[in-house]
Image (cartoon, coloured by chain):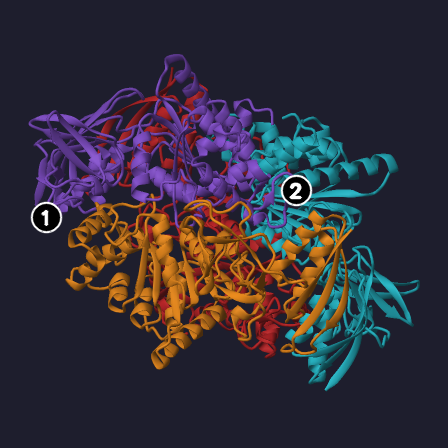
Chain colours: A cyan, B purple, C orange, D red
Amino acid sequence: MDTQTVTLHGHIIDSLILAKVLDTIVMLGGTFTLSEVTIGSKREDLSHSTIHIKAPTIELLQDILTAIQPHGAVVQAEQDCMVTPSPADGILPENFYATSHLATQIRWKGKWIDVSHPEMDLTIVVKTTPLSAHMIPMGSVKLGDLIVTGREGIRVFPLERPIERDVFGFMETQVSSERPHRHIIADVAKRMKNIRQHRQEDNASAKVLFAGGPAIIHAGGREALTWIIEEGYIHVLFCGNALAAHDMEASLYGTSLGYNLGIGRSVPHGHEHHLRTINRVRALGSIAKAVESGVIKEGIMAACIRQEVQMVLAGTIRDDGPLPDVITDAIEAQEVMRTVIPGVELALLVASTLHAVATGNLLPASTPTVCVDINPAVPTKLSDRGSFQAVGLVMDSSSFLRELARELGWKG
Amino acid sequence: MDTQTVTLHGHIIDSLILAKVLDTIVMLGGTFTLSEVTIGSKREDLSHSTIHIKAPTIELLQDILTAIQPHGAVVQAEQDCMVTPSPADGILPENFYATSHLATQIRWKGKWIDVSHPEMDLTIVVKTTPLSAHMIPMGSVKLGDLIVTGREGIRVFPLERPIERDVFGFMETQVSSERPHRHIIADVAKRMKNIRQHRQEDNASAKVLFAGGPAIIHAGGREALTWIIEEGYIHVLFCGNALAAHDMEASLYGTSLGYNLGIGRSVPHGHEHHLRTINRVRALGSIAKAVESGVIKEGIMAACIRQEVQMVLAGTIRDDGPLPDVITDAIEAQEVMRTVIPGVELALLVASTLHAVATGNLLPASTPTVCVDINPAVPTKLSDRGSFQAVGLVMDSSSFLRELARELGWKG
Amino acid sequence: MDTQTVTLHGHIIDSLILAKVLDTIVMLGGTFTLSEVTIGSKREDLSHSTIHIKAPTIELLQDILTAIQPHGAVVQAEQDCMVTPSPADGILPENFYATSHLATQIRWKGKWIDVSHPEMDLTIVVKTTPLSAHMIPMGSVKLGDLIVTGREGIRVFPLERPIERDVFGFMETQVSSERPHRHIIADVAKRMKNIRQHRQEDNASAKVLFAGGPAIIHAGGREALTWIIEEGYIHVLFCGNALAAHDMEASLYGTSLGYNLGIGRSVPHGHEHHLRTINRVRALGSIAKAVESGVIKEGIMAACIRQEVQMVLAGTIRDDGPLPDVITDAIEAQEVMRTVIPGVELALLVASTLHAVATGNLLPASTPTVCVDINPAVPTKLSDRGSFQAVGLVMDSSSFLRELARELGWKG
Amino acid sequence: MDTQTVTLHGHIIDSLILAKVLDTIVMLGGTFTLSEVTIGSKREDLSHSTIHIKAPTIELLQDILTAIQPHGAVVQAEQDCMVTPSPADGILPENFYATSHLATQIRWKGKWIDVSHPEMDLTIVVKTTPLSAHMIPMGSVKLGDLIVTGREGIRVFPLERPIERDVFGFMETQVSSERPHRHIIADVAKRMKNIRQHRQEDNASAKVLFAGGPAIIHAGGREALTWIIEEGYIHVLFCGNALAAHDMEASLYGTSLGYNLGIGRSVPHGHEHHLRTINRVRALGSIAKAVESGVIKEGIMAACIRQEVQMVLAGTIRDDGPLPDVITDAIEAQEVMRTVIPGVELALLVASTLHAVATGNLLPASTPTVCVDINPAVPTKLSDRGSFQAVGLVMDSSSFLRELARELGWKG
């Protein structure tokens, strides 16, 4: 029988953390006794508990410790984390630690230090001069980098229920199409107003990220989204070739994939319009030049250029062209996306499974995130991330954007 | 080798009718020659064609004739239809003719007479004094009724492309969530305005039918639908116990299935609210009394009572209570629905598979119909009816109703 | 400041019950202190806790007590339940207690007695000679019946994690189409084998309930389901007119809604087949007579008649005919469904939203239930019932039934 | 009033081609007269028609000619196509001709020549020594390349109904989940057997292409797909990093995204498995080396390596790692995919929207294609391509693959 003592500290009652830890221990086949339980009697009080875990084998005990670590359980007999040099560029040592998207610390020479930029499924590299720890992707590792291995000397901080009592402050992530959307959209709008005000008044770096797919244009959400960007509510845009191309097709031809948005009907040889649009922008050299030269007069791309929105256009194998701004290498695109994530305080993922999942992977668990899709499987996938902060809406992108714009003051 | 000569007459080019008839003949294994082909050179010109069909067996020839009859192919050697008396109440003679939802005539003593109330999957009964023919359901047949049997002496009139060039005038029924909704909703609103004006100015009996499910209340569409009814745009409502109960729950408690629509959150013991609502209305005796007595002050039911909308509430095995107005017998409910169908010139089927399909079955093919559902399978099912006049929208009911109300002038 | 003391007893750690109760108290605005906490250190040990709740108002305290009662919290100062006579047939007293689908007791003259047949959204009637308590629907209440009112003297028993460690023993109800189905289907098959064996060897009354829609026939699941019934694995069938009609259409014509299941193609005038089938069975008087007379030779209906499966066919407004066995009154159909529910130890709800939800409403929370649908919204709706025992599968009904039959030994 | 005479030739009745051309002319506002109509009386007979089109303006006449060109209407006054040199690398002349996925010819010095490799949304480049014409993507164009511009001297050949009367030979593309899958799967299996036999006996280059997503592994289809590949039924595989990584994770750890496929449950720290798998294969250098060295012993990747399947792994921004074989540049990946398309005589697109759409874009309209997805929107998107040859199946990938394997002889 092997034993280990762990401690839990924080809002462990309010967030069901203690319950989940105890449940996990017995589910995996261990037993426990509790001591030094201090349970706060109010929401804001902190609780504390010491848990003595027993398991029949050392392997099972390790499994239990691994499983409860994401809930913030810290092994009491603290020791430093282990590091192992990387054996080659882009290759990790066998026993590397795989990260979660929760705030994480490692213990180094007796002191706990923060690991920068929490993200799912990366590795931790330790830099010694000056001492720092970073989450980086496998492909960015260089020969000899000190990579954290094993599970000792690492602690993660589970998300606690946030203080703000809007939609992001509740455990139930909303993915039914049979619940009202209006409060969620109203809460999102309120957050967007706060972030914009914060930026304007305090010159803050807080950002709203929007990631979206071309259905936004096809389904009629372009006008509303353009307005939202022009008003300064969006600061980062992640999209693909198609959203940008069809937006500019609408500007040049009034169509989206050949469907005339003004008269509600496909037009003859309209399917060529996006190709002609792409060719034209290629000839001009960039979206910025197309806007600045007056060729593209309005729309999402024009608004982004004028509002200096940070745009990352990532390529896929579906692309025609592509537009000159598209980063066709997926790993390079990921890296650029990573550089603009810091500061994002609200993420809207709309009508794009690819961008929703890719962006969700890059965000820390603590970033409030809304995922909107007509297909309930997409928001479900996102809210399975296990965060208090992801909310799913099953509705079409156009209705969402028009309602959001109206909440923000649009008169359309 | 058996042969038969049929004629086709009408907009047979414009509506692909000739093509489909010839295609069907060869697909089923027959051959044909054409004679007396007169093809109109403009949309409004009628075309005419005589088709000589050959098939290796008499059975196959019969199959071909049956298959092309819904396209309006009339056997040239005309003869009267056959009738056979019904052997018992509710039982049809073996070889009864099963109807389609297209306009239909039967030939009786050398003259073609109209069959009243086209509806899918019924039978035709002939009354002799005065001479008339009616489509009726199997269950309404009485012993000795003269039932049309076989396929001779019956002709149907295929739908031609309608003259009005709005969304209902195009062959492509729209079921993708990646097409803009606004033109469709605008066209629907225009039809609703026309029908209302027509009723007001000409005292006409033209009606708009609305059939819907409780998701309308849950998802936040109640306010917009109430406004639409209050403004006199809806004249028939088909729904179930749940829509009515949750609408009145919202009036009494501000909740829908215990979810507070005002604050966007479930409330303690809120799931009891609809039961208390139903019990209260049962005690009062009817929805009308609940509204008239001032217990139910606003909402869809109140608007329907005040606007004298024809309501049919049909029961299902999911029902709690039910409300006193619910017709719990399905066949009786169907009969009542049938009595209010005549005059319906626009049907909106929203967020209810059961009501969408049941209402779709009762409507003639010529009735312009919009089916709205978040699940693409429901509009697909409806638009498979093979009519020019059914349009599907994949979106949530609340967004649809709010957009429709805005198109009609709502300021919400 | 108002206070109340409640006790919790049972597997309150393992089932997250304590955590949820404490969480609910603080979420609703109360505070608490714990005393007499005894936490079992193993899965099978019982835990106990006394919770002293404080709330600023008596109303809020009542709200908290109502909200935590479904988790098994029992007010310590026990008192008898209140009863009020029903004011009229089918009408409940204002303050009636609305039931959950959990095991429930009421306190009468100092003793706790069981309430029979737990079901959601009913009321409790007390009979005094002999003393007993029953859950009954609103519509079955008679003038003067003693109805339980208020919330005192009532306790419910929350579901604990079941001992059997198959799919029904885990908290995660499975509704993703991206999880393997095989283990779930294997576990369902194992339960079905056990129930059959139990019936055969011990003459037990344990039953498997199957509720399904006509897509089973359309999509090609008929052969497998027939085999499963013939082998004695199904004991109760809930369905509508359509499943029965298309099953017998397949027997008579080889088609389902006119689509030839043997050659994989629609056949000419095939859409009439189900009408001719219904008419023929109506003429014979019942499904049983159609089978016994040899008209219907094989299929689901034939297997059910031969295996003496308890069938309940409930009517809807979509029905053609209907078949003579269909109970067209929804409330009457519900009542008959209720009479065959006792003894059901496994429920399979396949490809029918209406039957899935209606049957789910009638079942106690403790009945292991599988909901299969191609539309993820249906299993989600079912598993929202808040039970450990409902599992959702997103797949087509035919693939499910064929895989299930193979697990049970089918060679098809 | 402008006029133009066009001719139609082929199975223009049987394929509804004549009807669609006439319909399009009147829909767009033109009128027509027919002359020299020769209609074949049997399926195999060719028909011929000369159509004189009139339109009020030259622009409208051009629109009509553009719109009917994809139906094979050839302008009678034939003239050579125009070509314009490309103004820069990767840039097309303004008026470039955008291709369809139908067989196409251009007229050059009075002779019609075939354009190689039909694909949607490309451009046509003419090479003069020796004379040839090719469809190429915009990005591959070099300065000075002769690009076909305008619409003169180009003709396309509409798809006619294919001779083989299996599922691909019918106009109705199947996207309902309420139709039986078995005949479709049986017909697909028959085609696969024919192609394999053809390759083995005649050393033919006919190929079956499989494009799929990681849900195949998650949902339990791995075993069946591995068998199908091992038996030599698949010759080209298009996938992403995830399918390959989870397949090899299953080989190394028995899990897929941490979910143990053998016991049907998530395992502790299982979400790390795919990262460790990817790291391990990166260290080895390639999937081929991982298989050849015996590290990866079985599964889809192992079968592909051993069967010498042409694999193209395309990267996306969702990717962890990625595996060393992944082509991270989207345009490069597209080019490689293009090189292996010739010879594909059957394409199976399973459980991947991205790969389904991307592959669909690359295939000629004449390639029989099956699209399988649990989400009906994906097959709908594919079958909107307007081909006789695309069939959609709404079902989960695992059930599809297991059924397909069984049809091919699998005993699993």
Q: Residue under circle 1?
A: B57
**Residue at 22% of width from left, 46% of height from top?**
C272
Q: Residue D256 vs residue C204: left or right?
A: right
- Residue A184, which numbered label? 2
- CA gap, disc 2 to disc 1? 66 Å
Secondary element under disc 2, as helix, strand or loop, is helix
Q: Is residue A186 above or below residue C69?
A: above
Q: Position of residue C61 (x, y in %)?
A: 70, 52
Q: Amino acid at mark 1?
A: Thr
Between B337 and A119, the one lying in front of the other is B337
Q: Position of residue B247 (x, y in %)?
A: 51, 37
Please say whether residue A133 is visible from this viewpoint: yes
Residue B363 higher or lower than C339, as above or below: above
Secondary structure at badge 1 equals: loop
Which of the 4 image quarters holds residue A207? top right
Foreground mark, 2 or 1? 2
Q: Chain of mark 1?
A: B
